[in-house]
């Protein structure tokens, strides 16, 4: 294959492949780039910023690579040949310096956003945050609404435009609690409580999952999140409150037993301090383990 | 733990494969092994194999053996990859073709095999084959240790493959995080196979790290100061420094996990004051340097390839050295970026994020230096050079993804997603694997004495490049669509299937590339008589390995090369300067089978611990110690190559 043929092959593939992908992706939702929460929105903007900054380096690298490769190919007798030219202070300064400047800019942004978007940071709002306690089980998510005295399995409903404070633990191997449309994920770990603050800013149904392998059934730890108006949320709360099932110790033990592909379930009452009890199982000495 | 209470430990008949996929895999593997044994027996080659290869301390022989195991494991790793892609392409709204448990063993095996046995194996293979020659040396600093390292690697290889026919493999991912990998959630033998295969092979790696570093520091030809040695040697030096300071962490961490599992201790459990987060910190304190251990020699290979095929000096030699030094140092201070989402807090996350981004600077410097090596060169686009271009095209994109994920706030949205998977495969395939393929095609004639067919090599490259893009660009998109890694199935309504199908087709294209590579080697062997490398300098090379015949004589250099500048061989050629041979007596190491014994006993030790056969493990441990003591007591481990003999041979 001649050099010309090799270059042509690359260009043809380079054109055809993105077109294929465009059709395959179609109208599907690219959640991270199509945020429904204020945290995810800020993260999307960060992604775009980082990509644009990187393009400053990437585009010249691509142009230089294919330009230099083409011009200085063996067959091109017109090109100058300088076999011993092997250093240049100015070029070195440019390619040590420019990336360093870009990285410094990105570093400042990194420091700032690590604080702004810290999962533990409460979201500023006039409304009081809704607290939801999350327990990762095998292989389902248990959601306790302590102030409302209800609980759900594999389903969340939250009011739009109101901060939600998730307190997260695990009674299973390590998991990761993630609703990409709304924002960050954070690990769910036994014997500890992590925290995630999110807020939906438009109504809709969003997908949640576990982003860390926790055993055989972890792929089925999916849950829907309905972000709804305050009124709808209140009526949903009332409806769940009338549910007969009570999440007490016995019911919890049944839930904790490994099972996958669990359908959403609802509990009208929750044993007080259940979340703390789950954590204490691991931290108290003389545990049943 | 009564030493003799269980003669057979926890071995039982369930250990044999009982599902069709594993049975098929086991049969294929055993079939391949038995065919090889049958062929060797038929052609009566056992004595030759033992004397010429297995007991040899010649790094050129050891290097080839590393490559054989590395490339065999590549086949197994790609088979695993194919199974993963098939499962994920089909499992849209259904369970797919593999059970969850099997699927999780498949991807755990895939990652473990690719990193520890393919990448490390090919890397140590190439270093063995090339480093002593490039330095003008006749061997590595510790030839016996070199053999031990290889055989320990082979013992790890044997354990992992044994898990396919007897027992099960880990289903906890390639790094086996606790609590999932602890006794409570993984009581079977799988995680234990994983621990001991890596623990044994890891000792081999650490010994190699010491061996190659000392070789570079103490065995360069006279006149070759550090700043006159080839860039590949510098890259190996950085990599081996990383090995020496990182592998002990792996040994300690695997050790603690095995204490948890064997003796019910609580290093990494969630209760009785254990802490799984400690494991994650330690394993990544090893794991991050590990990936730089792999990429640095690949960078070194590119420096050699680009300079040789551009017919031009490597641009910015000292700048490249500083870049390697910077990358080596920075590798140690970034490990937390693998778990920003574990909740360390903003300041800690920010520190590690910033350190991670800084690594992009020296890496970029290297790319620019390669480009300006090409500038005003006269470039031949032989296969090794194609691999370099493929690297630039892919690695830069993967690097951008990496810089993105270095921002903790962005990482919160892409951690553990297919975006991450696409990123690290871009770095490992586009960087490490393409680099190793460039090295293999570049140095093949030096190792085997004949040329590889260029046309088939070109076809192989294009299949790999396009296949790789088809397999992984969809994964970047899927990650942004919220797809987590390691899923065995997903909801049909998500619309992810199309991208998974494209990714699956990409793996098939890669397989075609592998097919071309196999065809290339087979055809080149068939046509070798017409393509002999008669001069030893097929590519018009610059460095010392090209100054000897292909293949090199077993002692590398009849007389020790004298060096006074970089690219001494190239300079001598252009000045039409020949150096007179000065023959002196020297010693070469004798063959020994003790490396095989040490590794064999280590294999049995691992097997004993995995299956809780305590007496067997104890006996095997004594065997290892006994073998080492025996070796120490041996006096005559070398033989003389006399100057008279060399002079006579040269005179013929």
Image (spheres, coloured by chain):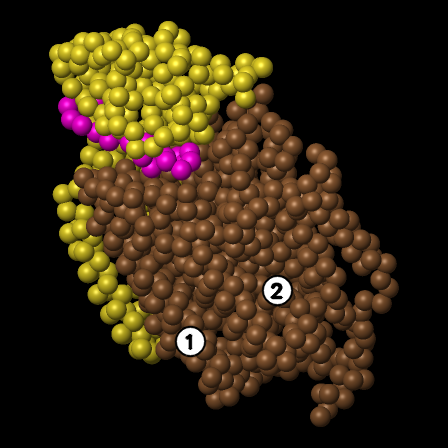
B427 or B151: which is nearer to us? B151
Among the chains pictured, the one given yellow colouring is A
Residue shown at 55% from the left, 59% from the top: B121
Res B332 → quadrant: top right
In magenta segment, residue A205: yes
Q: Which residue is mark 2?
A: B128
Other-residue count near label 1 (Cα within 10 Å), few / some / many at <14 / 14–19 / ≥20: many
> Gap in Å between the C-alphas at discs 2 and 1?
23 Å
Q: Tell me the SS state at disc 2.
A: helix
* Extreme residue in the bottom direction: B652
Residue shown at 21% from the left, 50% from the top: B498
Q: Give me the chain letter of mark 1.
A: B
On the same chain: label 2 and label 1? yes
Q: Which residues are magenta?
A: A196-222
Q: Which residue is mark 1?
A: B520
A201 or B73: which is nearer to us? B73
Q: Residue B504, relative to residue B71: is it above or below?
A: above
Q: Give me the chain letter of mark 2.
A: B
The N terminus of chain B appears in which quarter of the rendering? top right
Q: Residue B208, relative to residue B105: is it above or below?
A: below
Q: Is residue B238 visible?
A: no
Q: Is B486 placed left or right of A26 in the picture?
A: right
Among the chains pictured, the one given brown colouring is B
The C terminus of chain B appears in which quarter of the rendering? bottom right
Picture coordinates of residue A170, whole percent (x, y): 42, 23
Q: Of the two numbered discs 2 and 1 on the same chain, state the one appearing first in sequence.
A: 2
In the picture, the disc for residue A263 is none
Q: Is residue B159 visible?
A: yes
Q: Is B592 placed left or right of B388 in the picture?
A: right
Residue shown at 63% from the left, 29% from the top: B265
Q: Tell me the SS state at disc 1.
A: helix
């Amino acid at each position: 294959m001649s050099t010309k043929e090799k270059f042509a092959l690359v260009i043809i593939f380079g054109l055809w492949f993105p077109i294929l992908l465009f059709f395959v992706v179609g109208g599907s939702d690219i959640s991270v780039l199509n945020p429904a929460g204020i945290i995810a929105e800020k993260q999307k903007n960060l992604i775009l910023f980082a990509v644009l900054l990187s393009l400053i380096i990437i585009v010249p690298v691509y142009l230089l690579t294919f330009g230099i490769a083409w011009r200085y190919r063996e067959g091109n007798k017109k090109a100058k040949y300088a076999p011993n030219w092997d250093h240049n202070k100015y070029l070195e300064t440019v390619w040590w310096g420019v990336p360093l400047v870009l990285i410094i800019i990105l570093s400042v942004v990194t420091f700032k956003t690590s604080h702004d978007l810290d999962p533990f940071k409460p979201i500023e709002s006039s409304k009081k945050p809704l607290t939801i306690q999350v327990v990762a089980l095998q292989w389902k998510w248990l959601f306790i609404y302590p102030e409302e005295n209800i609980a759900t399995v594999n389903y969340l409903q939250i009011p739009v435009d109101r901060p939600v404070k998730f307190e997260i633990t695990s009674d299973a191997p390590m998991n990761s609690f993630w609703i990409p449309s709304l924002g960050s994920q954070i690990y769910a770990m036994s014997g500890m409580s992590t925290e995630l603050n999110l807020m939906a800013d438009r109504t809709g149904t969003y997908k949640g999952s576990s982003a860390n392998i926790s055993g055989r059934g972890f792929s089925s730890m999916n849950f829907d999140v309905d972000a709804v108006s305050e009124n709808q949320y209140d009526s949903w709360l009332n409806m769940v409150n009338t549910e007969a099932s009570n999440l007490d110790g016995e019911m919890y033990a049944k839930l904790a037993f490994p099972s996958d592909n669990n359908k959403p379930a609802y509990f009208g009452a929750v044993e007080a301090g259940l979340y703390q009890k789950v954590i204490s199982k691991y931290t108290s000495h003389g545990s049943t383990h | 733990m009564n030493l003799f209470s269980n003669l057979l430990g926890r071995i039982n008949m369930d250990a044999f494969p009982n599902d069709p996929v594993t049975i098929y895999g086991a049969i294929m593997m055993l079939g391949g092994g038995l065919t090889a044994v049958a062929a060797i027996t038929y052609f009566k080659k056992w004595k030759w194999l033992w004397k010429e290869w297995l007991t040899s301390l010649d790094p050129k022989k050891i290097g080839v053996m590393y490559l054989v195991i590395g490339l065999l494991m590549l086949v197994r790793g790609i088979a695993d990859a194919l199974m993963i892609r098939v499962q994920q392409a089909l499992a849209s709204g259904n369970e797919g073709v593999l059970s969850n448990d099997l699927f999780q063993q498949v991807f755990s095996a895939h990652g473990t095999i690719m990193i520890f046995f393919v990448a490390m194996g090919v890397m140590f293979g190439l270093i063995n084959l090339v480093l002593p020659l490039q330095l003008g040396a006749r061997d590595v600093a510790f030839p016996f240790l070199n053999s031990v390292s290889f055989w320990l690697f082979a013992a790890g290889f044997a354990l992992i493959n044994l898990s396919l026919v007897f027992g099960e493999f880990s289903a906890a991912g390639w790094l086996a995080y606790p609590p999932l990998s602890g006794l409570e959630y993984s009581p079977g033998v799988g995680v234990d196979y994983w621990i001991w295969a890596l623990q044994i092979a890891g000792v081999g790696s650490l010994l190699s790290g010491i061996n190659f570093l000392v070789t570079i520091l103490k065995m360069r030809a006279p006149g070759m100061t550090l700043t006159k040695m080839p860039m590949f040697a510098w890259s190996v030096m950085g990599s081996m420094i990383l090995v020496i300071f990182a592998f002990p962490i792996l040994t300690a961490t695997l050790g603690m996990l095995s204490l948890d599992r064997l003796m019910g201790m609580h290093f990494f459990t969630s209760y009785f004051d254990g802490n799984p987060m400690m494991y994650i910190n330690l394993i990544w304190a090893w794991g991050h340097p590990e990936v730089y251990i792999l990429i640095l020699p690949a960078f070194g290979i590119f420096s050699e390839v680009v300079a040789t095929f551009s017919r031009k000096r490597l641009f910015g030699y000292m700048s490249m050295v500083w870049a390697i030094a910077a990358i080596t140092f920075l590798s140690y201070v970034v490990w937390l970026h693998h778990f920003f989402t574990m909740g360390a807090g903003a300041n800690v996350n920010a520190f590690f994020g910033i350190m991670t981004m800084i690594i992009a600077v020296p890496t970029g410097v290297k790319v620019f230096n390669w480009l300006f090596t090409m500038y005003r060169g006269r470039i031949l686009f032989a296969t090794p050079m194609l691999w370099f271009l493929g690297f630039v095209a892919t690695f830069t994109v993967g690097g951008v993804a990496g810089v993105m994920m270095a921002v903790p706030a962005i990482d919160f949205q892409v951690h553990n997603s297919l975006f991450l998977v696409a990123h690290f495969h871009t770095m490992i395939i586009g960087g490490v694997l393409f680099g190793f393929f460039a090295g293999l095609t570049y140095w093949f004639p030096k190792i085997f004495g004949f040329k590889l067919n260029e046309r088939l090599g070109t076809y192989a490259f294009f299949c790999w490049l396009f296949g790789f893009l088809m397999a992984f660009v969809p994964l970047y998109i899927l990650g942004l669509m919220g797809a987590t890694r390691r899923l065995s199935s997903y909801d049909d309504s998500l619309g992810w299937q199309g991208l998974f199908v494209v990714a699956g087709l990409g793996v098939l294209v890669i397989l075609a590339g592998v097919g071309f590579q196999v065809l290339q080697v087979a055809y080149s062997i068939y046509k070798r008589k017409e393509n002999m490398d008669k001069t030893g300098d097929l590519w018009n090379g610059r460095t010392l390995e090209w100054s000897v015949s292909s293949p090199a004589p077993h002692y590398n250099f009849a007389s020790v090369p004298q060096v006074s500048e970089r690219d001494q061989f190239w300079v001598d050629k252009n000045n039409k300067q020949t150096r007179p041979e000065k023959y002196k007596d020297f010693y070469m190491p004798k063959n020994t089978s003790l490396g095989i014994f040490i590794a064999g006993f280590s294999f049995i030790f691992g097997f004993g611990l995995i299956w809780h056969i305590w007496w067997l493990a104890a006996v095997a441990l004594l065997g290892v110690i006994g073998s080492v003591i025996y070796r120490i007591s041996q006096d005559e481990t070398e033989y003389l190559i006399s100057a008279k003999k060399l002079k006579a041979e040269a005179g013929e």
